[in-house]
Image (cartoon, coloured by chain):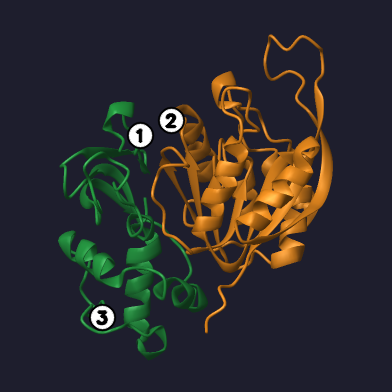
Chain colours: A orange, B green
Amino acid sequence: MKPSALNRLLSEVRDFEKPKITLEQYATDKEMTVDVINLIDDEVGLEGTTVLDLGCGCGMLSIAACAMGASYCLGVEIDPEAAQICKENIDELECEAVMDIIIGDALSVPLSEGFFDVVILNPPFGTKKNEGIDIQFVEKALKCVREGGSVYSFHKSSTRRFVLKKGEEMGAESRAVAQMRWKLSNTYRFHKKKAVDIDVDVISFIKRKKISD
Amino acid sequence: MKLLTHNFLSSRFLKDVSTGYPLKLSIEEKRILDSALDVNFLKNVMVKIDYEVLYNVAESIGESELLPPPDAPVTVDTLNDEQLNKLHRVLVCLDVIVGTLECPESGRVFPIRDGIPNLLVNEDEIA
């Protein structure tokens, strides 16, 4: 699918109505989603793959993956309201033959290990209260992806070295594949500054094959 | 919820539950989705799923006819068109809209509404 067509499709995706600060919810930027999904598609080829989206929210990344030809996509979302919006998006955009959602805690719901070809995730970056939660999401993603499969995750650029090191420790070839500037402007009313921009990396983790004797 | 998704869900995260698999499925409402058969996808998936669990859940809802029996490993290449279509139907097309999933050990019931299973539990239920 061409970026322009994907962009048009994603413009139909409905977003969070009342973002919840405790879950660090915010809408995933549509143009950015198009760029990221195209990048992933260039690198691994999404056609015919099985995809897992941990913390799928309203389903922006998942629906984009479906549009690029994924054969099966599972979204896991802890917030029932977001899952409901995601479900409506799936039906509206006719992805229901490809995509399933479950409501549950992405970190604790047992999922098939080594099943998925690709895992995409836009994890909470973590606050002082839940520091390191993004790494826990990556760890879970690496469990679910097959050997040789890829995990794509978003992280604050300021934590790049740490994230890459953790990825290597967890048995994945890790590298930053893109950097973007996010405007988190109008998501939460109590943000003091009008627009809060942060630099965000897309990190690719390729799960190393186990060496058999 | 597709039976493919059912195939890897468990309630192992519950307190005092050791495997919690497979979850017992009851269906109140379902639909059959329109989707083209993709043999390569079936090949990819069949080597990863627990086929006996798929067969048994299909049987429990009256959908096991034509499916290859689970007593021997199933090779997609050896299946005829009817069997391939049936496999595709139970894995991908059959969509549970309303029903429940029940933990085989604790009896904890998880609702399925609007096609979405809800596996959220209270903190005191988690191991």
Q: Is residue A178 left or right of A166 when viewed as pictured?
A: right
Quarter location, residue A105: top left
Q: Looking at the picture, which amino acid does disc 1 mark?
A: Leu
For this view, does A17 lie left or right of residue B84? right
- The reply to whether label 3 and label 2 mark residues of one chain is no
* Subunit bearing disc 1: B
Residue drawn at the location 38% of the way across and 50% of the way down: A110
Which x, y percent locates residue B46?
40, 74
CA distance separating discs 3 and 2:
37 Å
Quarter of the image holding residue A170? bottom right
Spatial CA distance of label 2 from label 1 is: 9 Å
Disc 2 crowd, CA 10 A, few/some/many (<14, 14-19, 20+):
some
Of the numbered discs 3 and 1, the one sitting upstream in the chain is: 3
Report x, y in % for residue B41. 50, 72
Disc on res. B120: 1
Provide the chain ID for the residue under circle 3: B
The dot on residue A80 is 2
